[in-house]
Amino acid sequence: MTIDSFYGLLVGAATFLCIGIFHPLVIKAEYYLGVKSWWLFLLIGICGIIGSIFADNQTVSILLGVMAFSSLWGIGEVFKQRERVRKGWFPKNPKRKDY
């Protein structure tokens, strides 16, 4: 068994961690910025894609790709989060008036 045998586990764990990080990021971004935060997730996603393309290391490229697509997934989730807030499933930010 070599270190290469563990790349699948590394990518799986990193994917799990990335999703686990982006889930609360989406919630916080919607709470503080509203749906206008979608462009931040787009920017992070584009940077991740570019980084993934130009990364010299295959593992780094894969991890950047996972991060990029988790961020792009977050765009849709910001809009869904707004609906969850409207339904009362998550708290509204009392300082924002755009609900």
Image: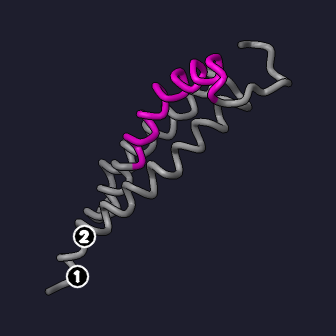
Vertical position of residue 33 compared to residue 16: above or below: above
Q: Position of residue 30 (x, y in %)?
A: 65, 29
Which quadrant of the figure contains the N terminus?
bottom left
What element does badge 1 sit on?
helix
Vertical position of residue 20 compared to residue 14: above or below: above
Please state the extent of the stretch shown in magenta in the rendering.
Answer: 67-89
- The residue that disc 1 covers is 3
Q: From mark 2 to mark 1, how far is it between C-alphas?
A: 7 Å
Q: Is residue 83 magenta?
A: yes
Identify which residue is drawn at 30% across, 56% down. Answer: 62
Q: Position of residue 60 (x, y in %)?
A: 34, 62
- The residue that disc 2 covers is 7
Identify which residue is drawn at 45% across, 53% down. Answer: 18
Q: Residues within 10 Å of mark 2 (few under 14, many from 20)?
A: few
Magenta part, dominant SS: helix
Q: Amino acid at mark 2?
A: Tyr
- Kindly indicate the quadrant of the structure image that contains residue 61: bottom left
Q: Residues within 10 Å of mark 1 (few under 14, many from 20)?
A: few
